[in-house]
Image (spheres, rainbow, N blue to C red):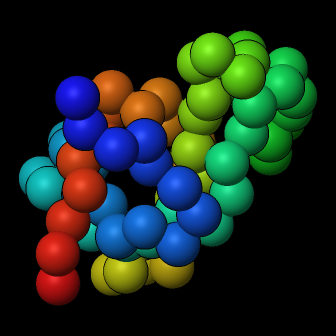
Amino acid sequence: MTQPLKLHDRVSWNTPQGLTHGKIVRVISTHTTVDGRTVDASASDPHYEVESDSSGKHAVHRGAALQRFKA
């Protein structure tokens, strides 16, 4: 079993433009709203707010969509 993702981990994820890299800036473990979008997270299914290295923009993803990345 792999280690769970945590704050400041370096990760990669797929976008329509291709693979993107960044870091986790927030771990979301409760139902909340981020930038007007509902995030249905829980302690057993956390979501992660990530910041893109290339654009600086933030997005929220499920853990299954993220892969740990070593720079």
Which percent across, then down, holds residue 68? Answer: 25, 56
- Tell me if residue 67 can be seen: yes
Which percent across, then down, holds residue 22? Answer: 37, 71
Q: Quarter of the image holding residue 52?
A: bottom left
Seen at 33% across and 81% down, the residue is: 54
- With 58 as the anchor, is 52 left or right in this view? left
46 vs 22, nearest the viewer: 46
Seen at 80% across and 45% down, the residue is: 35
Q: Quick one: quadrant of the N terminus? A: top left
56 vs 23: above or below:
below
- Tell me if residue 51 can be seen: no
Seen at 72% across and 22% down, the residue is: 43
- With 52 as the anchor, is 13 left or right in this view? left
Q: Quarter of the image holding residue 69?
A: bottom left
- With 71 as the anchor, is 51 left or right in this view? right
21 vs 39: above or below:
below
Q: Quick one: quadrant of the C terminus? A: bottom left
Which percent across, then down, holds residue 19? Answer: 14, 56
Seen at 59% across and 63% down, the residue is: 7
Q: Quarter of the image holding residue 10?
A: bottom left
6 vs 1, nearest the viewer: 1
Residue that lies at the very extreme toward the front in this rendered image: 1
Which percent across, then down, holds residue 11? Answer: 31, 61
How many marks are shown on the rendered structure? 0
